[in-house]
Image (tube, rainbow, N blue to C red):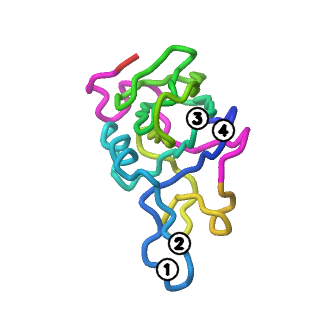
Amino acid sequence: MIKVLKAGFHTSIQDKGRIGFASIGVPVSVAIDSYAADLANYMLNNSLDAAVLEIMFGGCSLQFLSATFICISGANFSPKINDKSIPLNSRIKVTENDILSFGKINYGARCYVSVKGGFLNQEVLKSRSFYKNITPKPLLEKDDVLEIETFKNALEMPNSSLKVVN
């Protein structure tokens, strides 16, 4: 689980979208930068269909209530875990109570955060993507809790033998 400490300007969960519902007026609702979202999932050996966080202009902070791996791709908003800078496009191990935060905007408008196994929020019309009037909420808010796969320790995590940056 992940708790939203600060939601930022425009933070939502996105995936490959709702395909096949345009005839009834439902938009696709997809990650804007599909390349960055795919890269974040690829780095964790997730399905490219796995849901990711889409963060616009940073300003977001999250507390991990369980251990996992993450990858951040796309825009560089000076990501940090527990106030220590972390690189983009890398597999990062996070442990219980770690805090991921974003600061100065170095470049770009949207970054994507993937977690091992993807975000597990409710599917609506075959997608986990947030969209106004389609899903219960269009954006994340302070104190929201996001469901993810839980692991007791790093040894239990799939593909944990890959290089880990701490």
In the rendered structure, which amino acid carries the disc numbered 1? Answer: Ala
**Residue holding disc 3:** 58
Closer to the chain start, of discs 1 and 2, is 1
Regarding mark 1 in the picture, which secondary structure is present there? helix
In the rendered structure, which amino acid carries the disc numbered 4? Answer: Gly
Residue 140 seen in the figure: yes
- The residue under the point 44% across, 40% down is 114
Residue 12 as seen in the image, left or right of residue 76 = right
* Structural distance between the alpha carbons of marks 4 and 2: 24 Å
Closer to the chain start, of discs 2 and 3, is 2
Residue 100 seen in the figure: no
- The residue under the point 57% across, 28% down is 102
In the rendered structure, which amino acid carries the disc numbered 2? Answer: Pro
* Structural distance between the alpha carbons of marks 1 and 2: 6 Å
- Tell me the tag on residue 8: 4
Q: Does residue 101 sit above or below 12 in this rendering?
A: above
In the rendered structure, which amino acid carries the disc numbered 3? Answer: Gly
* Structural distance between the alpha carbons of marks 3 and 1: 31 Å
| Membership of 44 in magenta stretch | no
- Tell me the tag on residue 22: 1
Q: Quadrant of the N terminus?
A: top right
**Residue holding disc 2:** 27
Q: Quadrant of the C terminus?
A: top left
Closer to the chain start, of discs 3 and 4, is 4
Viewer-closest of 159 and 99: 99
The reply to whether dot 1 and dot 2 touch (C-beta < 8 Å) is: yes
Question: Magenta residues: mostly which secondary structure?
Answer: loop
- Magenta stretch bounds: 139-164
**Residue 72, image quadrant:** top left
